[in-house]
Amino acid sequence: MVSAEVTTLGATTDRHATAAAVLAQVRRGELVESEHVGHLVVLAPDGSVRLALGDPEHVIYARSSLKPLQAVAMLRSGLDIDGERLALAAASHNGEPEHLTTVRATLGGAGLGEDALQNTPTLPLDDAAALAWQVAGHGPASVAQNCSGKHAAMVATCVAAGWDTATYLDPEHPLQRAVRATIAELTGVPAEHATVDGCGAPLFSTTVTGLARAFSTIARAPSAAPGSPEARVATAMSTHPWHVAGTGRDATAFMRAVPGLVAKDGAEGVYAAGLADGGAIAFKILDGGARPRPTVLRAALRVAGADRAPGTDVAALSRAGLVTVLGHGVPVGAVLAAFGNDVTDPADPAELVEPVDAEAQGLA
């Protein structure tokens, strides 16, 4: 029995791996040191496929990249928040002080306190925020965890809809049934598989293409369906990108660089993004690593035409996707996409990294 199970699992893994394509290469000096494989799709504004690598129809758990879809479901169910609070509902935030203030504002607006949160207690995601939190005498807490904005919005939705707040993490709760139905609708893919995400919320499956399709709908909604839940989520995220992630985070940097961009990273190597014209991207890094995600997203955004979109800060777009390889503390290589401009015109990382001012940093 055990051997049969192992064989079945191995066969599934082999199919997953053999269908994957190389999405990024790690170059140190003149050599390719490592490669990251995965599945990627870039959709044109009309929904046609501009680029497909690996198997974009592969079923995945999109992890936190699903948060904008979950936020749409909450608005449809009666949640009435916008701006920073709605951006935070779709966030994997750093746990910086303003993030936590916004979480508490969402809870307070629903007449709730931090004890209503049932997400996994942790320290803040950001190292500096985590240190300050501990120096202030705090330990792991639900409000500090990077998904607390989503969970605050979930319990606030329950209050607005008249649903029980104590059981909001039950997959059969009306809120989670609404989330599952919304994911299936926006992706065009049945949410056949369900499990538990790291924060404790139910997690539903989709495909890489389905995820891109959903982000296309959300990102173009401000012009295609003004005032809709999708438009409200897109506007909140693109207008308040710091609340979606935080200081030093690439999701924030990408949305600041490209007007109207809706971008959301997810654990286990997932990323999705939608442009204001309806172009969209989604990918899954097969090894689950986060290292190549910014580089792959930058290259995919260029394929989608983001660098030619009105108002795009092309230099900031390049910096947001830069992942350097260090040798003795200085750049000696980079993580480069295995498609698009990185292949034909690989950037010199030394030209894109701002030099350290030793005196200003107190290092001289």
Image (spheres, rainbow, N blue to C red):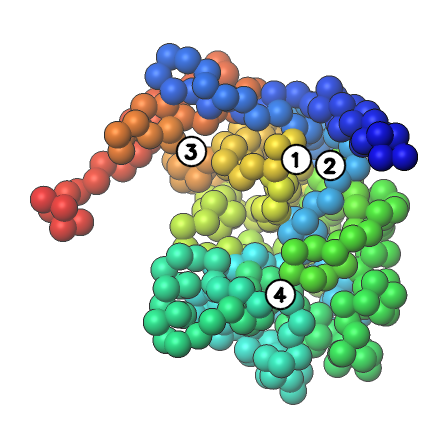
| Badge 3 element | loop
Q: Residue furthest bottom?
A: 111
Give the Cα distance between marks 3 and 4. Answer: 30 Å
| Badge 2 element | helix
66 vs 272: above or below: below
The residue under label 2 is which amino acid type?
Answer: Val
* Circle nearer the N terminus (2, 1): 2
Residue located beneath label 2 in the image: 208
Residue located beneath label 1 in the image: 284
Residue at 42% x, 33% y is 323
Q: Which label sits in the foreground, 1 or 4?
A: 4
The residue under label 4 is which amino acid type?
Answer: Thr
Q: In the rendering, at what x and y percent does residue 184 appear? A: 84, 49
Residue located beneath label 3 in the image: 323
What is the number of the mark on residue 120? 4
Q: Which label sits in the foreground, 3 or 4?
A: 4
Residue at 56% x, 37% y is 289
Q: Which label sits in the foreground, 2 or 4?
A: 4
> CB under 8 Å between callouts 1 and 3?
no
Q: In the rendering, at what x and y percent does residue 205 appear? A: 79, 46
> CB under 8 Å between callouts 3 and 2?
no
Residue 240 visible in rendering: no
Residue 126 visible in rendering: yes
Which quadrant is the N terminus positioned in?
Answer: top right
Give the Cα distance between marks 1 and 4. Answer: 24 Å
* Circle nearer the N terminus (2, 4): 4
The residue under label 1 is which amino acid type?
Answer: Lys
* Circle nearer the N terminus (1, 3): 1
Give the Cα distance between marks 3 and 2. Answer: 23 Å
The residue under label 3 is which amino acid type?
Answer: Val
